[in-house]
Image: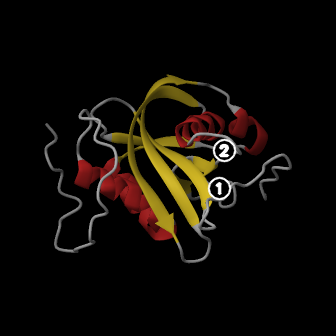
Amino acid sequence: IMKFKPNQTRTYDGEGFKKRAACLCFKNDREEEVLLVSSSRHPDQWIVPGGGMEPEEEPCGAAVREVFEEAGVKGKLGRLLGVFEQNQDRKHRTYVYVLTVTETLEAWEDSVNIGRKREWFTVDEAIKVLQHHKPDHAEYLKRLHLSCSPTNGNSLLPSQPSNDNFPLTAHATCM
């Protein structure tokens, strides 16, 4: 089913990137389990909840709103993990935040309207399920391994050169 949003105005930045916001929603501060939602276009695939920013909306506000609509959760918004650009097919610039879930709704907008599902995954499992069809979403979680700073509020990281000899699956110990 195509998701029809008649009232949605897409917003673009000065360079023509569509502005998006997303959240990695964690069960607790340890950031070991992350919540994924089913894709509206491909219900058998999991994605990180997120979507387009509305005009005049701040990235952090958009991230919280999208998570509420798509995953039916509220929580404590943490650091900005990074701004991720996707250039291949569509130009997107996505602000990705970390959120610790404090409240989970039984029924929520997308579950009622389009039957969207949500499920908890360990970070490593989530990377595996996203890697195949949403490699850009898997990148968010890989950046988490690199940043590994749940509490120091360090937001923007310099973009990491992707050197493949860095074992992304090895858990660095966060202080």
x 22%, y 74%: residue: 163
Q: Give the percent coordinates (x, y) of residue 95.
A: 49, 50
Residue found at the very far front of the displayed protein: 14
Q: Secondary structure at mark 1?
A: loop
Mark 1 lies on residue: 43
Residue 149, compared with residue 172, is above or below; it is: above
Mark 2 lies on residue: 116
Q: Give the percent coordinates (x, y) of residue 103.
A: 51, 22
Residues at marks 2 and 1 touching, judged by CB atoms closer than 8 Å: yes
Q: Amino acid at mark 2?
A: Arg
Q: Give the percent coordinates (x, y) of residue 8.
A: 78, 48
Q: Is residue 4 visible?
A: yes
Q: Secondary structure at mark 2?
A: loop
Seen from the viewer's position, the closer of residues 78 and 42 is 78
Q: Amino acid at mark 1?
A: Pro
Which numbered disc covers residue 173? none
Residue 107, compared with residue 25, is above or below; it is: above
Where's the N terminus, which quadrant? bottom right
